[in-house]
Each structure stands twice: as structure tokens, then as C-alpha cells.
Image (cartoon, rainbow, N blue to C red):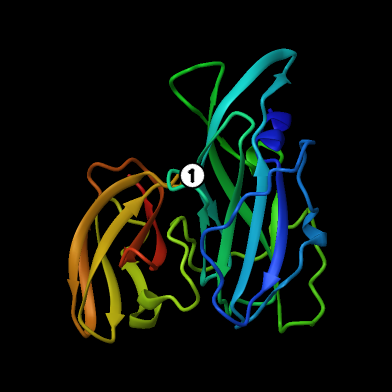
Amino acid sequence: MKKLLTIIFVVTAAFAVNTAQAQCICTPIDTFTEPGLYPEPEDLGCIPQNVDTSIVINFKNYNTTSVSGINITVDSIRIDSIINLPCGFEWKTNTDDRKFNNSESGCITVQGITSDPVGQYKLDIYVSAWINGLATPIQYTAEGLGLRYDVRVNASAGASCPDIDSTSNGLTASCRKTEWSCVNGIEEVANNVSKISNFPNPFNSNTEIIFAANEAKTYTFRVFNILGATMHTETVDVVPGQNRISFDAKNLESGVYFFSLSNGQSSVNSKMVVNK
């Protein structure tokens, strides 16, 4: 199974630090022929704090492979979530549905500005794979199948990068984004909304989303699971000062969920835990 996900996520990354806003939609490179993960995390440049930075990840989807001695066809994959990117970063694929066919080349833009602490951040990557003509995809976590990828934050452009420690879980970003609405530069929602959290947390059935806003805006409030599937959505009118959104989790099972306020271009996110 490790081989399957490694081949599904045939990734190579190009790193660029931009003083101007980068293009959100990347263009795939279709010259890769061998499966594998490129470059190794230690060969990927660091993300400087407080600098507009863009990482482009190119990959080629696999055709057929052998898992536990059984030959399978990888019909297509969908990239569901990339979690634990440094705060201020979002990602977007070159396709709107984040889905890639057998042998298709694709790319992911990871872009933003972060003030998160210097260190290494282990990415949690969730994908769905359609194999052998089956109508129902199989869902994978990269870590669960032995595939790991890390990004690193350093203090400034040209500063030393922290060493990669493959046995360490690294740092945890305080705002875990699973949105695929890559933004160009500054995040508009984050400039208006601050201190977003929920109380109580963990909770059984009801909680309140609490945050402060600088000005009146209309946003979409969304709750989604760790695979990026939307569990609840509603439109909220935010007012200057403190805001509260009541949320009823009666239809959710116990587990970790994420919630966001979005204007369709950028968002702020946080985590909630349902404990029934």
C-alpha cells in the first residue's frame, strides 16, 4: 500500500520566493517518467517568515502497479486535503475538481505569507483513489501508508534552514487549512477576522464559534471533516466587534473537524473536537 500512495503522489517540487504576488494556478510539467517523490524534503528550500512565498509541486499520476502481489490500475486520484501547512498558506491544484486521471500530470500551488515559528512542519496529505474500475474510491492518508513530506520555515530569506528530522512530528500549525482557494498574497479574511475559536471544545452537541471582526462583511461559515468533505454550511453576516455563531453537532459523529469563514477567495480556519 505504501508503494501505491508513493506512486500516486509522484511529486516533484519547485520552490520560489516572490516579492510580488505569484500566479495562483500552476502549469503542470509533463516530462517526468519515473515514479517517486522528488525532491527529498531536505532538498526543498525554506519558507522565510513574513515573505510572500510560492511552492509549486508537480506530479504524474501512475498507470498500473502491484500491491501485495496484485496488479491494479489506478484510474484516477483526487487530492482531498493538505493539512498542517504553516498558517497563512493555502493550496490549489491546476484543476478545479482536484482530480487527475490515469498517467495525467498535474501540479499544486502552495502560496502565502506566514509568521509561524521557525521549524519543520509535517504535512498530512489525504487522497482518494479510484482503482480497477471501481465506482467507490479508496481513501488514504499519506502518513498511514508510510509517505511523509515536510516543509520548513526559517527566520528570513537566506537564513539557515532547520534540519529535517524524519522521526519527529515537527511543529503544528495553529490554523490548519484544507481550503483549495489559493490566494494571491495577503488574505483578506484574515485581515478582518481575528481570534477565532469555539467554546466549549471538545463538546458533545452544541458549541459557539467566537471571533472578533474589524468591519461588517458577509462570509460563508463551513464545517468540514479531515478529508475536506463539507458537513455544514451557512451564510453569516459579520459585524464589527465580537461575533458568535451557534453550531449544533447533533448530526456529526465523534472526531476532529475543522471550520472556516470564507469570502470565496481566502479564509480563516480552526479546529473543533466532537466527543459524544
Q: Residue sitting at 62 percent across and 73 percent down?
A: 53
Residue drawn at x 71%, y 22% is 65
Q: Residue at x 69, y 43 (%)?
A: 30
Circle 1 residue = 98
**Where 44 sits versus 190, above or below?**
above
Instruction: Specify whether 82 is left or right of 254.
Output: right
- The image quarter containing residue 262 is bottom left
| Residue closer to the observer: 247 or 27 | 27
Can you give x and y, in whole percent of width and height, for residue 106 in the image? 60, 45
Quarter containing the N terminus = top right
- Residue 46, given in percent of the width and then of the height, sits at 73, 71
Residue at disc 1, secondary structure: loop
The location of residue 226, given as percent across then percent down, is: 45, 47
- Residue 104, by quadrant, is top right
Task: Count neighbours of disc 1 (C-alpha within 10 A) and say few if under 14, some if 14 to 19, many if 20 or more.
Answer: some
Q: Please name the residue shown 70% across and 46% down the image.
A: 11
